[in-house]
Amino acid sequence: MKKLGWMTAAAMSLALTAPVGAAEAKYVIECVTRAVEQANAAGDYSGYGAATNSFCVLGGWLATGEQLQYSFSMTKGKSYLIVGAGDGDVKDLDLSVSDGTDAVEDTEDDNTPWVHVKAERTVQATITMKNFAGSDELDFCCFVILEEGGADGSGKALVSAVTGLAKELADVEGVGLDKTPGAICFMGGLFGTGGELGITRTFTEGAYGLAGWGDKKCQDLDLALYEGKRKIAEDTEDDAQPFVECEVEGEVRGTIQLKMHASSGNSWGLCIVLTPE
């Protein structure tokens, strides 16, 4: 069986040794690693890789019975491989992809579901990940989106970015991953100079931190949080490690925006949402 050239599980597991201030960050590494291992075992998908100019690594916390959803654009005629993973406490994680008419799903009794779809038309598809059987507490779950003909050889750069982000968290005291159930708190994408990626989610009242990280090709990554057109907070410093702190009043539908201000080619940009412990 061929292996994905996009990323090796062995390379990703190196990030486990990174010092992490927020203990929950280890679950991000664990889940992404497990998702990649499953992608390698899912079948002959050696021609698949990370899509550019879109978020393709996402995760959040789910209690048993809860689900997380994300919409992304599928292009007519192109095939996609979506692979999910839960942390060690998740016994059964389900995954489905729907174009609004038909759905392809994996409801097998395991915590590494995967779905392979070919787009019959260009459409916004919805990924639904459900923690069908987990622990008595919140469990971290994630999924990766690969596409036919996607970027190959980008795995080491992603490992470096995840490790760098973990090291940054080691310097931030008194915070942990945002554990709002069903909300995306970790996201990453591959994009070039001038590219922007945004994702909208609900923020309840309280204090938040947004920590970003760019890989070695990235010279300047900017990070901002918006409510509609209103800018709540931003970091536009000339570096690849933006960090934003903000207070949210009431309940807000906020958009996290990453902008690749300067890079030498397509670069990994990551963001993680933090709250005070």
Image (spheres, grey):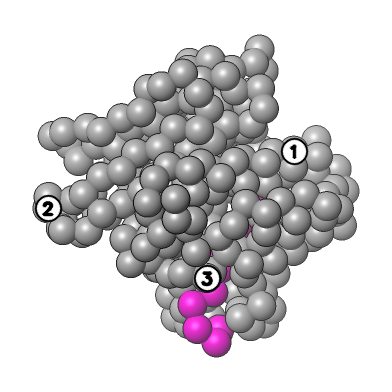
Q: Is residue 230 above or below residue 138?
A: below
Amino acid residing under circle 2: Arg
Identify the residue shown where x is 80% and y is 44%.
22
The range drawn in magenta is 263-273
Residue 177 placement (x, y as % from top left) = 70, 41
On screen, residue 92 versus residue 167, left or right, reads left
Q: Which residue is mark 1?
A: 24
Q: Which residue is mark 3?
A: 153
Whether the residues at callouts 2 and 1 have beta carbons within 8 Å, the answer is no
Residue 159 placement (x, y as % from top left) = 66, 61
Identify the residue shown where x is 15% and y is 58%.
76
On screen, residue 71 versus residue 213, left or right, reads left
Whether the residues at callouts 2 and 3 have beta carbons within 8 Å, the answer is no
Q: Magenta-highlighted stretch: main secondary structure?
A: strand
Residue 243 placement (x, y as % from top left) = 70, 62
Label 1: few (<14), some (14–19) or many (≥20) C-alpha neighbours in 10 Å: some
Q: Observer-nearest residue: 182 or 11?
A: 11
Q: Which residue is mark 2?
A: 121
